[in-house]
Image (cartoon, rainbow, N blue to C red):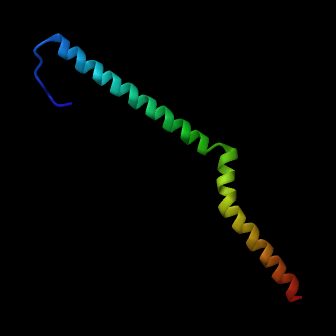
Amino acid sequence: MKNREYSSFEEVDKDLRILQLRREIAQEEIKGNLGDLKQRFEPASFFTAFGEGVLKRLVISWVLGFLLRKFRR
C-alpha cells in the first residue's frame, strides 16, 4: 500500500485489518500450492505421470527392437 495520512485510529485499524487478511489469504494460497506440489511428487502420482510417457516409449521401443532382432535371424 502507498503512504497515506490518517485522520483517525479507526482508519489505521481498518488498513491493518485489511493487511492482516491479505497476509492470511497469501498464507493459505502457499499452503494450497505446497499441498499440490507434495501430491505431484508422491511416488504413486510421480511414477504414474512418468510411466505414461517415458516408460511407455521405452517399453515399446524395447519390444520393437526385440521383435526386429528375432525376425532378422
Please tell me which residue is depicted at 78% across the width and 78% down the height of the picture. Answer: 65
Q: How many marks?
A: 0
Residue 27 in the image: state x and y as whole percent.
Answer: 42, 29
- Quadrant showing the N terminus: top left
Please tell me which residue is depicted at 69% across the width and 52% down the height of the picture. Answer: 48
Residue 70 in the image: state x and y as whole percent.
Answer: 87, 82
Give residue 50's quadrant in the image. bottom right
Side (left or right) of 20 relative to 55? left
Please tell me which residue is depicted at 71% across the width and 64% down the height of the picture. Answer: 56
- Quadrant showing the C terminus: bottom right
Give residue 41's quadrant in the image. top right
Side (left or right) of 34 relative to 64? left
Side (left or right) of 20 relative to 69? left
Give residue 36's quadrant in the image. top right
Side (left or right) of 35 relative to 65? left
Residue reaching furthest to the bottom: 72
Residue reaching furthest to the top: 9
Please tell me which residue is depicted at 39% across the width and 31% down the height of the picture. Answer: 26
Residue 6 in the image: state x and y as whole percent.
Answer: 12, 18
Residue 2 in the image: state x and y as whole percent.
Answer: 17, 31
Depth order, front residue of 58/29: 29
